[in-house]
Every structure is written in C-alpha cells, then in structure tokens.
Image (tube, rainbow, N blue to C red):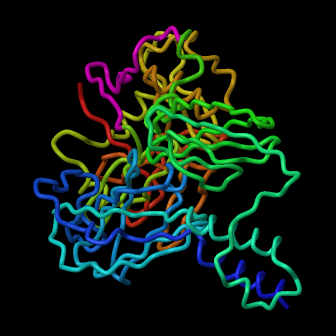
Amino acid sequence: MKKIWFLIVIFALSLAVKAQLYVKEGSFKEVRGFVNINTEKMYDDNDKPYAVLKIKTENINDKQRRELCFQGDAATFFEVEYNVGEVWLYMSYYATFLKISHPDLSSTEFYFPFDMKPKCGYELTLVNKPAVDEDIVKRLEKLENANNNANVDKPVEAAEKPVKVVEKPNEEIGYISVTSTPKGAFVLVDNKIVGMTPYLSEKIVVGNHKISVSLDGYEQAAKRVDVKKGKEETLDFVLVSEQEQVEKAETPRHAAVWPFGPKKKGVFSVSKDRQVVFSPGNVQRRSSKRWTFAEHQWDGGSLIDFEGMQEVVDGVWFVLSSDEWKYLLDKRKTQSGVRYVRATVNGVFGIVVLPDDWKNDNFDLKNTNISREDWMYRLEASGAVFLPAAGYRFGNWDKAVGTDGYYWSSDAIDTPYLRFNSAMLSTMTNVFDHEYGLSVRLVKEL
C-alpha cells in the first residue's frame, strides 16, 4: 500500500512539472517609438494596418521559436518574422486575444488588456517553464530516499514526518564543477536541471553523465564526462550565440575559393538601346491592393489577371513587351553566347536567363539540376535570373503548375505572352483572355 501511495505522489508531481508556456505577468506594453515601418508587412488581407508585436522569449531556443504557432480571433491576420531571441508578429490591430502553442511545450492563451492601435509597436515576454523544476527534483529525491529507508513495519503516517536523507552505504560518488561564458546558464545533468553556472555540484554518482548548459539566445552545448570516485571533474563551456550560428550556417562552403567577386545585379539587353535589371522574384499578392516580391526566385508568386498586372506597374517597375521578351531570349548578344537554359532550381522547373556578361566558367550549365546553394552562391550571385514554371489560373483552378510557365507582356492588343515548357519556348502566344491569371515578373531600366 505504501509503495502504491509513493507511485501516486511521483505521478502527480510529474504532471505538475510538465513544460509550460506562459506570458510573463505585466510584460505586455506599448513601446513608444517602436512602429511598423516594414512596407512589405504593412496591411492585412482586409487592408487594415497591422500592429507589430515583439515577442521576447525566455528559456526557448531558436529552433523552438521557429516552431511556435499563433492563433487569434476568426478575423485576425498574422505575418511572422523570426529574429535572434525574439519573434515579431505583424497582426491585425483589432485582435482581442492571442494563443501561442508549441508541439512540445504546451500552449497559452493571452487576452490583450487594452486595445492596440494601428501601426504601433508592442512587446510581451513568453516564458517556457522548464520541464523539471529544481525544487520538485529535491522533493522527489527526499521522497525516494524516505521510501528506501523507511521500515516496512511502520504505519504509513510515519513517512509524512521529516526524514533525513541518508546516503546508501555502498554508493560511490564524485563531484563536478561547471562554468560557462557567458555565465548564468542552466546546468543539466542527464537532462535534469540542477543549477546555474558557475555551478559546484553536490555528490554525484560515479559513471558517465551528460552535462549540458542552456542560455536563452545561445546554442545549447553538451559534453559527456566520466565521474570518478572522490574526484571533481571540471567542465568549461564557451557558448555560441544564435546569431553567430545563423551567420555561420549562411556562409557558403565554397566561399573561400569562390572567384566571382561580390554578388551583383545582372544586366539584360531587351533591345538595341535598352537594358534592364529584373526584380528579385515574381510578384506576390499580399492583399487585394498590396503586392511584394516572392522571397526566392524559385517561388512561383501569384497568378494575376491582366488588369491586376497593370495595377502593379509603377513609375519604376514595368513589364516587358512581347518584342522585348523576344529580343531578350532570341536575339541579344551575350559574352558567353548563351541566353538562357531550361533547368530545375531547388526542385522547381523553369528557365534560367543569363545576363549579358555571363561567363561560362561561372557555372557548368550542362548541370541542369541546380541545388539551392549553387543557385544562390554561384548563379544568382553572378546576376542570373530564374523564371519558375508556375502555370496559369482559370477561375479558381491552377493549371500546368511545375511544367509550364506563362508570363504576361505589356501589350494591350492581343496581349502575346511568354510561354515555355520542357519542349518549347514562345514569346508570341496569344490564346488567353485578360481574365486568366499568369505570372508577372517586373524589370526596371538602368
């Protein structure tokens, strides 16, 4: 009976220490001077201005931050931007509550204590309560020792009295000391939190143990150590900030030998006396009247009707005419003698358009299956442009996605457009009405 009681206590306490997210009390506030100036994240799908909420985090690493999920009222819109140590949430200013969840860290609901204002900035602090609490660990250890040392003939009530922890007579123990730069990091022994750096342990059972340190804003680090009887093992950790880790990850593996100089904009002749540069991606719809460029050139962007395409054009960016598409792809002279190639970039089929000054030693164009890394650091960095085969739209249906590319020209009469697939390329096709949705790629003149 006593053993059953002890197991029930252990189970109840284990439930109490489950990892839990919560918003730190009093942390939500308006930040004076912090306003939304991001022109790409300015309005929601109802054309209402966003407010921006800076979510600071404690005891949540970069991977966990990127796995956070956000929900709000039925009419609330979100756009998320991940920064070092925090998340920026562009959200409808009229939202009344925010639910934040994580597959491993539970969830929390926060009701805004006052109304937010459009374009204004706010902040709150999201905390992850550790899965194992130090005080509860000590209580469990005492309960376990009490159970091991209690006389089975004594009544159950005796276990409720204060019990002195007695070491097992044959148990071999040693010690560890842990330091870190910077200090103040959580110390975990075999995934259980035992203190913070600088840390001097109490007695620890001899044998091999995993020692980890964790500090918000830094990558977690771990080492294994063999604890010997009566000896103290010293461990020192130099933590790497998440920003340093991101910069390291984004550095191309061949950067040290890359011979092509700094990244540049490709220059493309579209007539005998006109040169242009392309936008960094296809046009992407954000709302009925708001547009931006797709994040990557292999992203298809939005399929837009002819009238919508005309609304995108401004005094700087414009769409090529059918004659200019033809000159670009069929007539212009290039240093390499190659104007374009069909290829797959990061798993997406399309055509790679090469700039006027492209050199064949920049990249072996016989390789038409181009990786993400080679595209970003070899071709795109040398000015190449990729037009993904994003298909076309008729009504609510998207057709030929991934096999055919359809790009508007600016011609108002008959409206010839660029079409390509694995077998053909034409700059004079004119089958679709203006109501069809095609891809839009903008250019601007030098």
Say if the magenta span includes residue 273. yes
Position of residue 305 measured from the top left corner of the image (x, y, whole percent): 37, 62
Position of residue 390 measured from the top left corner of the image (x, y, whole percent): 53, 52
The answer to whether residue 115 is above or below residue 347 is below
* Residue displayed at 72% across by 77% down: 10
**Image position of 131 (left or right of 115):** right
Total numbered badges shown on the rendered structure: 0
The answer to whether residue 301 is above or below residue 133 is above
Position of residue 367 measured from the top left corner of the image (x, y, whole percent): 69, 24
Q: Is residue 347 visible?
A: yes
Residue 126, by quadrant, is bottom left
Quadrant of the frame with the C terminus:
top left
Say if the magenta span includes residue 102. no
Position of residue 331 measured from the top left corner of the image (x, y, whole percent): 44, 22
**Image position of 164 (left or right of 199):** right
Viewer-closest of 23 and 233: 233
* Residue displayed at 41% across by 42% down: 281
The answer to whether residue 383 is above or below residue 203 is above
Q: Is residue 268 visible?
A: no
Residue 124, by quadrant, is bottom left
The answer to whether residue 271 is above or below residue 117 is above
Viewer-closest of 267 and 230: 230
Q: Which residues are magenta?
A: 258-279
In the rendered image, the residue lying farthest to the left is 33
Viewer-closest of 42 and 227: 227
**Image position of 135 (left or right of 224):** left
Viewer-closest of 363 and 117: 117
* Residue displayed at 27% across by 78% down: 112
Quadrant of the frame with the N terminus:
bottom right
